[in-house]
Image (cartoon, rainbow, N blue to C red):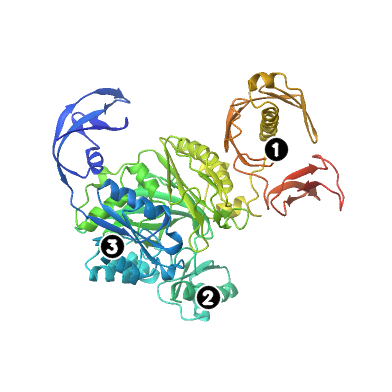
Amino acid sequence: WGTYWTLPATMSVAGSRLLHLNELLRQSSRTVVGVSSKIISRERYQSKLVVHKVSISCCSSVLQTFDKILIANRGEIACRVMKTCKKMGIKTVAVHSDVDSSAVHVKMADEAVCVGPAPTNKSYLNMDAILEAARQTGAQAVHPGYGFLSENKEFARRLAAHGVTFIGPDTHAIQAMGDKIESKLIAKKAKVNTIPGFDGVVKDAEEAVRIAGEIGYPVMIKASAGGGGKGMRIAWNDEETREGFRFSSQEAASSFGDDRLLIEKFIDNPRHIEIQVLADKHGNALWLNERECSIQRRNQKVVEEAPSTFLDPETRCAMGEQAVSLAKAVQYSSAGTVEFLVDSKKNFYFLEMNTRLQVEHPITECITGLDLVQQMIRVAKGYPLQHRQADIPINGWAIESRVYAEDPYKSFGLPSIGRLSQYQEPVNIPAVRVDSGIQEGSDISIYYDPMISKLVTYGSTRAEALQRMEEALDNYVIRGVTHNIPLLREIITHPRFVSGDISTKFLQEVYPEGFKGHQLSDSERWELLATAVALFVAAQLRSQRFLGNLSDELETCSHVCLPGNSLVCRFLQVDLDGKRVDVSSEWNLASALLPVTVNGTQRTVQCLSRSASGEIDLQYLGTSVAEGQEICVIEAMKMQNSMTAAKTAKVKSVHCNAGDTVGEGDLLVELE
C-alpha cells in the first residue's frame, strides 16, 4: 500500500499541486486510491519547487487490459512492444519464420510460434497462420507493429471475427486513410489543408498530361494505395508525365496489387513534418507535437527529430488541431500519424495518415514522457485517454538515427547482408536509447528490411542531443556487415543540419555526386596521423615487451617514420613536421573502441581489423577508406574533379603532394 516513487529533477509542482502526476501514474499498472499531499523533500530549481519523492497509496489490483498479446511482427518493433507488455504484466507471443527461429524477439517472448518459411508472403504476411497462432496460444489481442499487416483492414476484420482485439484503429479508419484519393477527400471535408491536385483516379497517360497542365508543373504522380516511396514519380513536362504514369502504374500494380494513380502539385524543396495523434473510442483525441522527418533518401526517412527547428508555436498548434480534426472525421482510435509537407513560408499541406505506430515514435516518447504502445493497448481495451491537450509537454529534444545494414556509398544506402561478427550498442552513454532486435551473431537476411536499430539520443537542448548522437555513433561497434553510420554521422554534424537548414532534398543537395565519406580537414588529418602513430608505437612495444610499464617504454621511444612524414614520437607527444600534437589514451589494444584525447579534443577511434603482421585498420570520425570515398581532387580549367576509390582498400602510397602539377597517366595514389 505504501509506494515511494523517485522523480526526475525536472518534475515540478506549483504550490501543492503535482503537475506531472498523470505521467507518474502512467508507469504503474496499479489502481491508485490515494495520493499523499506530503512532499518529503523540496529544493528551489529555476523558481520551481522540485519533488524528489512523493508517497502514493495504491491497491494491488492490476489495471485490466489483456492477459496475453501476440505481436504480429519481428525485429526491433516486436522487441519494443514486448518491453511494454512485460512492464504491464502482459504475457507475449512471438511469431516467426523458420529462419528467425533463434531471433531476439523469439527469445524475449513468453511463447513463440513458427508461421512459415522465410519469404514474407508465407510467414509474416500469412494471415491464416497468424490467426491460428493466436487461437493456439489463447492470445486475446494482436499488436501488428508497423509494416507487414499493420494497415491491412482484412487482417483487422478477420481478427475481430475470431474474437481477437486488433491493437489499432478499426477497419473503417484503416480503409479511409489507406486510400490516398479517399483520404484527401476526407481531409478536405475536415478542413485540413491539402495539396492542389486531381481528386479522382487518373485513367490513362493522356489524361495525366491534361490534368498536369491544369495543375501546373511540377506534379507528383503517385499510387493511390502506395507507401514507402513506391509508385511515385515527379514530372516537369508532358513527356515525363507520360513516362511517369507508365512506370508508376506498373510499380503500383506489382507492389500493392492496385494500379490506380493520382496527380497533385509537387511542392518543391519542402520539409516533411508529421504530427503524432492519439485517440480513444470515446471521441477524445490529442496531438502529441511534431516530428521533423525531412532527411530522406528515395522517400525513406534516415534521421528524425522532435520537435522541429522550423515550427513556431502558432504553426505547431494549427497543424496539431488539423491532425486531430482528421482523426475525429474518421472516428480514429489508437496512435496514428498525420504527415504534412511544409514549404519555406510555413504553409503546410496534408500528405497522408499512417494508421499505425511509426518507426520514429521513440522521439515523441522522449519529449512527452508517454509510452505510445501502452496507450495503444489501453485504448484497444476501451479505456479513455488519461491526458488532456494541456498536459502534453515538449520536454527537451530527441533525435533518431536509423542504423541500417547497407552501403551508404551506393545511392545513399543499398542493402548489405551478412552475420554480425561483433556487435556492441552504445548504451553506456547517458540519455541514449537503442531499439534493436538483433545481437552479436545475428544474421541480416535478404528476406527482410536491413534495419539494425533505431539509435535515439535525448538532451535538454538540441545541441546536447546532437552531441550525444555524435558520441553514440562513434561508440557503436558493428562488424560483419556494411553499415550506414558514416553517413549518419556526416548528416548530424553537417553545418546545414546543425543550423536547421534542411529539406527533403538535403542529401541530394549536400552530396550531388553521392556520399564519399568524411573529408578530413587539416587539423583532423593531424589528429588522425598522431593517433595512428601513437597506436603503432603502443602496438610495437606491446609485441616487444608483453609485461612492464608501457608509459616508461613510451618515454624512451625514438623515431617512427611513415611514408611522406618525418615523425618523432615521445610519450603522448607527436611532432608532425614541427607541429606538436599531444595524444593520450589507455591504449587497450584488445578493445574495438579506443578513446583518445588529441590536443584536448576527445575522440573515439575504432579498430576495424588487425592483421597477423600488425597492420591495423582504423575508423575515424565515422569513416574508413572505402569504395566510392574521395581520395584526391584535381583542378583543371578552374574545374575541380573528384577522384574516388574504385574499391574498398588501403592507401599503400601517395605519389604526389597538394599543389603539384600532374599529367595524364601519372600515378597519384596507390591502393592495396
- What secondary structure is found at the residue carrying circle 3? loop
Q: How many marks?
A: 3
Residue at screen point 25% across, 51% down: 90
Instruction: Identify the residue position indicated by label 1 in the image.
Output: 614
Q: Going from the N terminus, do you reach mark 2 or mark 1 first?
A: 2
Q: Which mark is residue 525?
A: none
Q: Quadrant of residue 339?
A: bottom left
Contact, mark 3 vs mark 1 (Cβ under 8 Å): no
| Residue mark closest to the camera, 2 vs 1 | 1
Mark found first going from the N terminus, 3 or 1: 3
Disc 3 versus disc 1: distance between alpha carbons? 59 Å
Q: What residue appears at the point 24 percent right and 65 percent down from the top-left corner?
A: 164
Q: In this rendering, is residue 161 above or below 305?
A: below
Residue at 79% in and 46% down: 669
Left or right: 493, with 137 as reference point: right
Label at residue 245 = 2
Q: Work out how far the residue at label 2 is from the one at label 1, CA to CA, in angstroms.
A: 58 Å
Q: Is residue 323 visible?
A: yes
Query: Residue 426: x, y in percent?
Result: 48, 39
Residue type for callout 1: Gly
Q: Is residue 100 above or below residue 10?
A: below
Please give left or right for residue 400 compared with residue 583 in the image: left
Q: Which residue, given by chain and number where applicable, does mark 3 sit on?
A: 169
- Mark 3 vs mark 1, foreground winner is 1
Let me know if residue 176 appears in the view.
no
Counting other residues with Cα less than 10 Å from the Cα at mark 3, is it few (<14), some (14-19), or many (20 or more)? many
**Residue contact at pointers 2 and 1, CB within 8 angstroms:** no
Of the two numbered discs 2 and 3 in the rendering, the one whose residue sits closer to the viewer: 3
